[in-house]
Image (cartoon, rainbow, N blue to C red):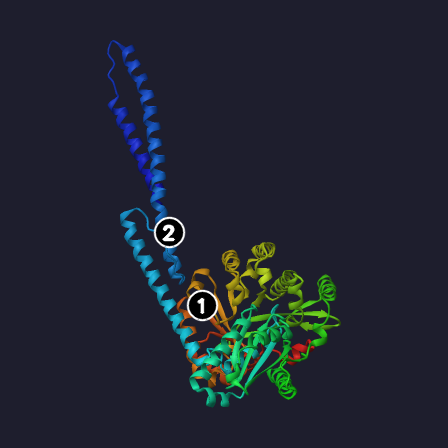
Amino acid sequence: MSLIRQFWIAIAVVMLLSLAAGLVAGTLGLASRSDDAYRSLQGTMPSLAWFAGGGLLCGLAGTLLLKRIRRPLRALVEQAQAIGDRRFITTPEPRTRELRAVVRSMNQLSARIRSMLDAEAQRLEELQRETQRDEPTGLYSRRPFLNLIDSALAREDARAGGALVLVRLEGLARLNQRLGRAAADALLRTLAQRLREVAAQHVESDCGRLNAGDFAILTSGGAASALVADALDEALRSLLGEDAAPARLLIAATDYAPGESCSQLLARIDGALAAAAESGEARAQIAPGRDTMRSARPLDAWRAELEAALAGNRLRLEQFAVVSRTGALLHHEAAARMQLYGEWQHAGRFLPAAARLGMASAIDACVVRAAVRSLEQDDDGTLAINLSAEALCDHGFRDALYDILKTRPRVARRLWIEVRELSELHHQVEFRALCLALRPLGCRVGLDHAGRHLSRFAELQDIGIDYLKISAAFVRGIDALPGNRAFMRGLCTIAHSIGLMTIAQGVVSPAERDCLAALGVDGMTGPGIGIVAGRTRPHASPEAADSGT
């Protein structure tokens, strides 16, 4: 029974007792002068009315007071429930002395756990720097950078495709002999800093050192290789002074498309670098990308084709298995395929053009409808879809998504919705609004391609997400990389401490699968998952994705 109800019952009991006492006390014995007695009784009615009115006013005042007292109690209960859900929030301290001490203790507990999460995230960042970064320059070392290239080539979103630029410092050994180790290292750090400055001009970019004298920039989102190479050439033009002769800088660049292999990409840019060395020219060499003809289509043509495909409902979902470390099916990933120019193409082919045209939300809405139809036809199915940054920021799309799922509770509970980690980083308010809207419906919300921005890890527990899909850049070859294993173990530990499920992306071999299971990863997805998924559908190869199969 609530405090307010108890309070009103007590008021009613007091009033009844007072009324009964008043009636008993007002019993009169009538003698000869009855008129005086009647006048006295009639005079008690206004007093009784005043008494009743005063009681009601006292009751209302008491109700308001109790509500004010109960407000911090409700906040305290919500905070306790949040801690039970591993969301360590803080609440304002109430004025009530007894409750203030309890709330202060709960806030101290939340702050202590948050500080522990911050410290663990900083430790993981430090471990990441030690195991994946080149010591003199701070850039990614060769193996982690190649993993980043593999991950970029496997993308199927609006940021698929981009440019790879390679810089070679010829004569580094002679520079060491001539200038000394300290001066040569200072030159390399300056070179690395200018690479970072050029890379910072693009939303998604990474820099790496492939060997002693080879450096690279990888950009995503369709950045033209010629523009990146020209900006880098301008930034490095004055790097080598007279003391550095006869050393020279060679620059080569090429565009890449999703689906091609890393070996093809590196072979193409190595050829351009060899041509730059033979020509002796100071300008950068540009190697044509494999997908030059397709990417050369004008945007007007893309718009007409995309609008026709949407109007004709020429979109379907490919489903790939995501399994637990024991091999049980967790859910299926849905990848969009659209029939364009007479063939089925994967999302990495058309989403970049759709994003430039402002049509990503329309395609995401079509994907949502297709996913809902699939879940309605399969009562046991569970499906994960990925939302673009444009859809995340589209209020109309979010409202429509909520309306669709609100009327389909059984579908909502089996739908997993993912947003790329970088999209969440750039659109935190919109992502929080999405989580608050979908969480009561039973949807699971997660971050895709996660693990690159650990400094904000402690904030994730306050948003209310359910899982992380860890980028393939940290997974590829993990069985042979002790540093990556230590990083993955720490990432799983801190994620589990705030109630998040961890899923590794891009698993290609049984060795990786067994290693990830031993490290505590909850789920896995990738080309090698068909080995354990049994009857579930394995991932398609990049070549199959290119052909639209």
Is any part of residue 507 visible from this angle?
no
Q: Is residue 252 above or below residue 221?
A: below
Q: Secondary structure at mark 2?
A: helix
The crowd level at tag 2 (other Cα within 10 Å; few <14, some 14-19, many 20+) is some
- In the image, which disc is placed on residue 82? none
Numbered-mark total: 2
Front position in the image: 36 or 358: 358
Query: Which one is nearer the viewer's eye here, 493 or 19?
Result: 493
Q: Is residue 453 left or right of residue 363?
A: left
- At numbered mark 1, what does the secondary structure look like: helix, strand or loop? loop
Residue 393: x percent and y percent?
57, 58
Q: Work out which quarter of the rendered image holds the C terminus and state it.
A: bottom right
Check disc 1: other Cα within 10 Å, few if <14, some if 14-19, many if 20+: many
Q: Earlier in the sequence, mark 1 or mark 2?
A: 2
Instruction: Assess whether mark 2 and mark 1 are in contact (beta carbons under 8 angstroms).
Output: no
Q: What type is the residue that disc 1 sits on?
A: Leu
Mark sitting on residue 75: 2
Residue that sits furthest to the front in the current view: 242
Q: Quadrant of residue 506?
A: bottom right
Which label belongs to residue 500?
1
- Counting from the top left corner in percent of width and height, residue 144 is at 50, 80
Give the image quarter of residue 123: bottom left
Hey, what amino acid is under mark 2?
Answer: Ala
Q: Nearer the viewer, residue 291 or 365?
A: 291
The answer for how far apart the CA atoms under marks 1 and 2 are is 24 Å
Q: Position of residue 235 (x, y in %)?
A: 56, 74
Question: Could you tell me residue 365's position as x and y percent?
Answer: 63, 60
Task: From the viewer's perspective, tell me whether residue 75 is left or right of residue 355.
Answer: left
